[in-house]
Image (tube, rainbow, N blue to C red):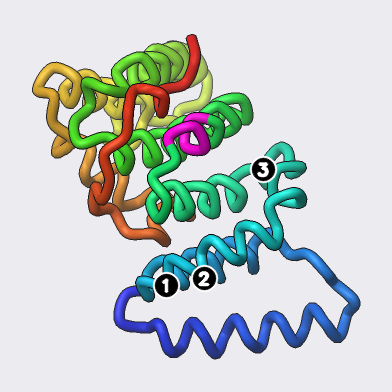
C-alpha cells in the first residue's frame, strides 16, 4: 500500500460497489483492507468507526478468516492502545495455527521482546515441533527443504535470538513478509503491558 493510497481507495470503492451489487453486506477482507488503509492514512477515528461498525461480525469469524479480524484488531490496538484486544487477537491466531501472523501483533505492541516473551517462546516451541515433522517428511519427500531460511526451525532460531538479545531486529525480515499483517507497516508504534502476551 506504500505510496499507493489513492489507488487503494479507488480499488476499495470498486470492491464495495461490487459487493453491494451482489447483496454482500459483510466482506471481512474488504473491512480489513479499509481499516488498514485508514491506519496508513493516519485516520485513527476511521479505524475505530469501522471497527465498531463491524466488530460483532469480526469477532464471530473462525478458521482462516481470523486473519482479517486480527489485522483489524491490531489496527485498533495501535490506534487506541488496547492491550487486552491485542492479546485476544494473538490467542485467536495461535488457535488457528497462524504462528508467524501471531508474531506480528506481539512485535508491534511491545518495545522489546521481553514483555511478550511467553508468547514468543510458545511460538518458537511450536515451530521447533513443526521442524521435526518437516525433517521426518523430507526423508521421503525430497522436494522439501528443512534447511531453507523460511523453514520453521530457522524462524524459531531467530525468535530465540530476538529473545536472547531482547531486540526485534533478528525478526525484521520475517515480520516484513507476513501478509496480511504487513498491511499495517512494521514500525513499533506503541507500548503496552504484558497483557498482550497470550496465556500459556
- Magenta region includes residue 186: no
Measuring 20% from the left and 36% from the top, which residue is drawn there? 111
Residues at discs 1 and 2 in contact (Cβ within 8 Å)? yes
Callout 1: 10 Å neighbours few (<14), some, many (20+)? some
Residue picked out by circle 2: 46
Q: Mark 2 or mark 3: which comes first in sequence?
A: 2
Q: Residues within 10 Å of mark 3 (few under 14, many from 20)?
A: few
Return the residue at label 3.
64
Q: For numbered disc 1, what is the local secondary structure?
A: loop
| Element carrying mark 2 | helix
Residue at the location (22% across, 18% down)?
160
Occupied quadrant, residue 170: top left
Magenta part mainly helix, strand or loop? Answer: helix
Q: CA distance from mark 1 to mark 2?
A: 5 Å
Q: Which residues are magenta?
A: 83-87
Residue 157 horizontal/vertical position (percent) = 24, 21
* Rendered view: 170 above or below 194: below
Mark 2–mark 3 distance (CA, rounded to whole Å): 25 Å
Amino acid at each position: 500500500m506504500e505510496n499507493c493510497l489513492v489507488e487503494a481507495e479507488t480499488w476499495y470503492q470498486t470492491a464495495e460497489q461490487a459487493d453491494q451489487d451482489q447483496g454482500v453486506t459483510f466482506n471481512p477482507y474488504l473491512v480489513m483492507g479499509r481499516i488498514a488503509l485508514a491506519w496508513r492514512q493516519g485516520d485513527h477515528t476511521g479505524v475505530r468507526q469501522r471497527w465498531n461498525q463491524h466488530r460483532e461480525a469480526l469477532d464471530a469469524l473462525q478458521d482462516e478468516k481470523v486473519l482479517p479480524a486480527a489485522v483489524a484488531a491490531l489496527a485498533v490496538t495501535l490506534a487506541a492502545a488496547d492491550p487486552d484486544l491485542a492479546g485476544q487477537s494473538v490467542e485467536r491466531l495461535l488457535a488457528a495455527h497462524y504462528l508467524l501472523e501471531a508474531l506480528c501483533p506481539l512485535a508491534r505492541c511491545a518495545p522489546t521482546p521481553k514483555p511478550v516473551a511467553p508468547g514468543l517462546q510458545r511460538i518458537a516451541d511450536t515451530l521447533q515441533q513443526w521442524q521435526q515433522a518437516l525433517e521426518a517428511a523430507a526423508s521421503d519427500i525430497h522436494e522439501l527443504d528443512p534447511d531453507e531460511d523460511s523453514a520453521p526451525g530457522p524462524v524459531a532460531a531467530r525468535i530465540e535470538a530476538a529473545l536472547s538479545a531482547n531486540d526485534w531486529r533478528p525478526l525484521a525480515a520475517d515480520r516484513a513478509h507476513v501478509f496480511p499483517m504487513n498491511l499495517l507497516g512494521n514500525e513499533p508504534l506503541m507500548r503496552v503491558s504484558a497483557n498482550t502476551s497470550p496465556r500459556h
